[in-house]
Amino acid sequence: MIDGISTLCIAIGLIFWLWGTWPLLGSRSVLFKLHSLSVADTLGSMAIVVGLLLQIPREWPLLILALISLAIWNTILGYVLAYCSTEDHPHD
């Protein structure tokens, strides 16, 4: 049962990765593309790590650290990219 749930989480993660890459082919703005990619990548990566956590629970401290790092890093990176893409910076 646990193996099935783990495989499902990993498969969902891979689907999120592919789903996030699809908007890159469209003609929308760069910010929309970056947002779609970063959200789907974060959710996909987190689903994969949860799947791994179910398969190898003895490594839970490292995998929980990976989940926290993914959430924080991708959120901050999104803000930095959005700030860098604006033309008028308030502190310049």
Image (tube, helix red, strand yellow):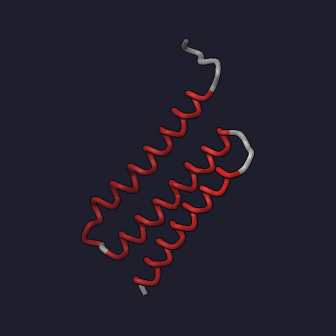
Q: Is residue 55 above or below residue 73?
A: below
**Residue, far left:** 58
The percent coordinates of residue 70 (x first, y second) are: 43, 51
Residue 5 position in % (x across, y down): 46, 80
Q: Is residue 41 above or below residue 59?
A: above
Residue found at the far front of this picture: 25
Single out the residue that lies furthest toward the bottom.
1
Q: Nearer the viewer, residue 26 or 81?
A: 26
**Quadrant showing the C terminus:** top right
Locate residue 87 relative to residue 66 in the image: left or right.
Answer: right
Name which residue lies at 30% across and 73% down: 56
Q: Position of residue 81 (x, y in %)?
A: 54, 34
Who is closer to the viewer here, 70 or 41?
A: 41
Residue 91, quarter of the rendered image? top right
Q: Is residue 85 left or right of residue 46?
A: right
Considering only vertical position in the picture, is 69 above or below 77? below
The residue located at (57%, 28%) in the rendering is 83
**Image position, residue 31 (x, y; %):** 65, 39
Residue 12 in which image quadrant:
bottom right
